[in-house]
Image (cartoon, rainbow, N blue to C red):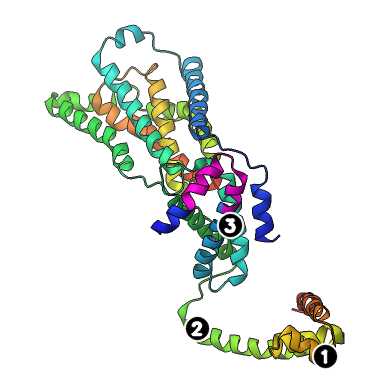
Amino acid sequence: MGSLEERLRGPWLAALGGDAAAYESSLRELAAMLRGYYRRRLASLPDEVEDLVQETLIAVHNQRHTYDPDQPLTAWVHAIAKYKYVDLVRRRSGREALNDPLDDDVEAFAASDHDAADAKRDLRKLLATLPDRHRRPIECVKIEGLSVAETAQRTGMSESAVKVGVHRGLKALAELIRRHP
Amino acid sequence: MRTEDLIRTLATGAGPVESRAASRRYVVALAAGSLGALAVVAAWLGVNNDLAALAKLPMFWVRAAFAASVAGTALVALARLARPGVPLGRASAAMVAPVLAMWALGAVVLLLAEPMMRAMLVLGSTWTTCPLNITLASIPVLAAVLWAIRGLAPTRPVMTGATAGRLAGGVGALVYTLHCPELEAPFLGVWYVIGMAIPAAIGAFLGPRLLRW
């Protein structure tokens, strides 16, 4: 932590003095630090990590006048990160119970097993509805694990067409999944 | 929005940060709050007619120092609570000290007094109104102080709200001494403490509701 503190402190103090470049690089360092922090704590909610990183960066930005130059920057950021984490957990637990009682565990495992099988079937079904130029690149790159170049060779598409196909195809899939939960 | 875009947006035109911003908020809030408390006491309760005579007695100033030290220690603790990552440290023990000192003084006074006099030393003549009056005088201060902290970043909302209430109670009690005829330590140790505890409880209740950020 000491070396992190030393690395962050100088640019941060310059940033508070009005140095925009130092501020940008400080925020980038803090974002990486926060991403690691939240990934460890939100292992069960990976989708929330980046949202929370951004929310915390905004809080850091809005509250940077509460930083006391005599205190360690890491302690200040950590307190903000923890506050935002607790806030998220509290918000979520209001909407849905995060902690299932232990008795339900066996049931929960069984349920998640079926979910995975269902998901696989659903994905095939949904994939089949996509046009070839989207479906083939996804099958090759995302399911079989080929590289973009190999996929281009096999399908006779250009490399950029493969990339675009994967991107648009995944977007279309996400849209389909949203409409058929 | 991508995080990288967000960072660039935040960094553009951020400008330098004023380091005195936090303390100026406290000064403004305490000035406005004290004026409000003064208005409540002077206009509604009225300044004590014997104020000049009372001010010649040492206990008048002990009482003022008691209320002021409750407010002062609360302000120190509040300044720490409103900054993320600053531990309270000895500030929390310091907040208890004025009350303990007043209780010790009150105990000595009660021990030395005639047994017949003890009830009167505790109840005085205004015990039914004192805590409520202190609470009313502290309301404007509490409102102003909560406003000040809303511009800062407290990470412990209940504790921060309670401490804001203590500060408001201390200032309210200090202003209330302009009206209050009671000078006995046992009275102050009971009714002033209750009067300052009520705004603290209100603050603890309001903290989580008003101090989110």
Can residue B122 be spotted in the picture? Answer: no
Horizontal side of residue A35 vs A122, given as left or right: left
Amino acid type, callout 2: Asp
What kind of residue is marked 1? Thr
**Circle 3 marks a residue in which chain?**
A
Q: Secondary structure at mark 2?
A: helix
Marked residue nearer the N-terminal end (3 or 2): 3
Mark 3 to mark 1: distance in Å?
39 Å
Numbered range of the magenta stretch: A8-25
Residue A111 lies left or right of residue A70; in this view the side is right
Q: Residues within 10 Å of mark 2 (few under 14, many from 20)?
A: few
Q: Main secondary structure of the magenta part?
A: helix
Tag 3: residue type? Answer: Arg
Q: Is residue B148 visible?
A: yes
Nearest the viewer among A52 and B56 is A52
Q: Kindly indicate the quadrant of the structure image that contains residue A140.
A: bottom right
Q: Which numbered dot is residue A105?
A: 2
**Residue at mark 1:** A155
Q: Closer to the camera: disc 2 or disc 1?
A: 1
Which mark's residue is nearer the viewer, 3 or 2?
3
Q: Secondary structure at mark 1?
A: helix
Residue A28: mark in rendering: 3
Q: Is residue B95 left or right of residue B137?
A: left
Residue A40 part of the magenta-drawn span:
no
Which badge, 2 or 1, is on the more N-terminal residue?
2
Q: Are marks 2 and 1 on the same chain?
A: yes
Give the percent coordinates (x, y) of residue B184: 25, 22
